[in-house]
């Protein structure tokens, strides 16, 4: 066999090997990320938080605080035991409703410690943990202008936080009722509420619990009215996790299941929703929902199917 033929055969063989290696990537097969192994190797877990999602996640002094922050801290404690790490460093990354999905998708955070309300489109970007809260969508207005008739908002400008499911919900309401509500986007709950306060917008749309938190933090809560009508049924909120990492999701869900079926969870809920919250001693007085009670009542490991719930 000539040298040229031998060389040609070698080239073809190398090309076939390279194509075999490349085929899974070309086919779009997801990479297994093994988050637990990465955390163990780096001895660091990266957690995302928001500074405007009271009482779930906000900045209290120099550190994040809130209901979902405490839940994440429980997961960190369980991780230390599972990975046998006495010192597991926690790195906090500030996010907002839109960037949280970018951070998770690009593996710049291991968990987003923010209440993420589920939707199918969101599930294509991020995995969701077991839900730890349920809340419907409503709107808040200045009391002297308040009404529960969505038609009265036609032609008016309302604020919605970008990157949230409320944008899609309001668009559907607009189309279904042939309304002409002008939707404006904002990236921060605090500035959005201030714009409502200053009369720049007629209403602010968000989850019921977040709106109650915003109203409670203002010096004059009596000046605002929360709508009686809801734009959605109570929606489940979980923690965002990386996609295609079954082992990590199972660990997080197992940890949440153990927490939520313990007496500690009732105490945790009461701490944030039925007790004065420092430093302003704000008490939201929000009873636990029937949906959350149903999950807590599980006699064995909690399971939840987001697709069937919706």
Image (spheres, grey):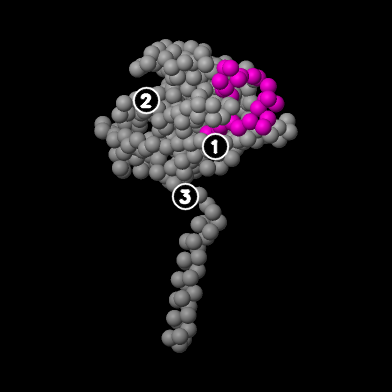
- Distance between mark 1 and mark 2 Cα atoms: 26 Å
Q: Position of residue 59 (x, y in %)?
A: 36, 28
Q: CA distance from mark 2 to mark 3?
A: 33 Å
Farthest residue in the left direction? 87
Residue 110 image label: none
Dot 3 or dot 1, earlier in sequence: 3
Residue 119 rendering spot, x and y as whole percentages: 58, 35
Find the distance from the CA under tag 3 to the CA under tag 1. Answer: 34 Å
Where, quadrant-wise, is the C terminus in this rendering? Answer: top right
Q: Would residue 46 be seen by someone viewing this image from the given angle?
A: yes
Residue wearing tag 1: 185
Residue 80 position by quadrant: top left
Tag 2: Cα neighbours inside 10 Å, few (<14), some, or many (≥20)? many
Between residues 89 and 297, which one lies in front from this camera angle?
Answer: 89
Residue at (47, 49) in percent of width and height:
31
Residue 175 lies left or right of residue 211; in this view the side is right
Magenta-tinted stretch: 139-161
* Lower position in the chain sequence, tag 1 or tag 2: 2
Q: Is residue 164 visible in the rendered structure shown here?
A: no
Q: Is 306 or 53 nearer to us in this picture?
A: 53
Q: Nearer the viewer, mark 3 or mark 1?
A: 1
- Residue at image position (47%, 80%) is 8
According to the picture, the residue beneath numbered tag 3 turns out to be 31
Coordinates of residue 4 in the picture (x, y in percent): 45, 85
**Does 107 sit above or below residue 289?**
below
Task: Select label 2 or label 3 by which is in front.
Answer: 2
Q: Are marks 3 and 1 in contact (CB under 8 Å)?
A: no
Q: Which mark is residue 65?
A: 2
Instruction: Indicate the quadrant where residue 136 lies.
Output: top right
Look at the image and say whether residue 157 sits in the magenta stretch.
yes
């Amino acid at each position: 066999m000539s040298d040229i033929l031998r060389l040609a055969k070698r080239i073809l063989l190398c090309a076939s090997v390279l194509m075999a290696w490349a085929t899974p990537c070309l086919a779009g097969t997801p990479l297994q990320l093994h988050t637990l192994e990465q955390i163990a190797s780096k001895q660091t877990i990266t957690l995302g938080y928001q500074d405007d999602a009271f009482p779930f996640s906000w900045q209290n002094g120099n550190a994040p605080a809130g209901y979902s922050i405490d839940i994440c801290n429980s997961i960190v404690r369980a991780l230390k035991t599972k990975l046998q790490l006495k010192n597991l460093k926690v790195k906090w990354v500030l996010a907002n409703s839109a960037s949280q999905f970018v951070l998770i998708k690009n593996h710049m955070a291991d968990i987003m410690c923010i209440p993420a309300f589920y939707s199918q489109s969101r599930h294509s970007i991020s995995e969701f943990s077991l839900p730890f809260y349920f809340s419907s969508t409503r709107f808040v207005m200045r009391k002297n202008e308040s009404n529960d008739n969505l038609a009265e908002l036609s032609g008016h400008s309302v604020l919605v936080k970008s990157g949230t499911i409320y944008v899609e919900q309001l668009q559907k309401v607009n189309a279904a009722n042939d309304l002409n509500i002008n939707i404006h986007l904002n990236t921060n709950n605090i500035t959005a509420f201030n714009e409502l306060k200053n009369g720049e917008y007629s209403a602010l749309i968000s989850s019921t619990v977040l709106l109650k938190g915003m109203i409670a933090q203002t010096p004059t809560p009596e000046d605002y009215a929360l709508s009686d009508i809801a734009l959605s049924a109570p929606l489940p909120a979980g923690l965002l996790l990386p996609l295609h990492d079954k082992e990590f999701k199972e660990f997080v869900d197992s940890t949440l299941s153990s927490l939520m079926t313990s007496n500690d969870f009732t105490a945790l809920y009461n701490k944030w929703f039925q007790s004065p919250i420092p430093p302003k001693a704000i008490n939201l007085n929000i009873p636990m929902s029937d949906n959350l009670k149903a999950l807590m009542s599980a006699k064995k490991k909690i399971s939840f199917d987001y697709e069937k719930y919706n």
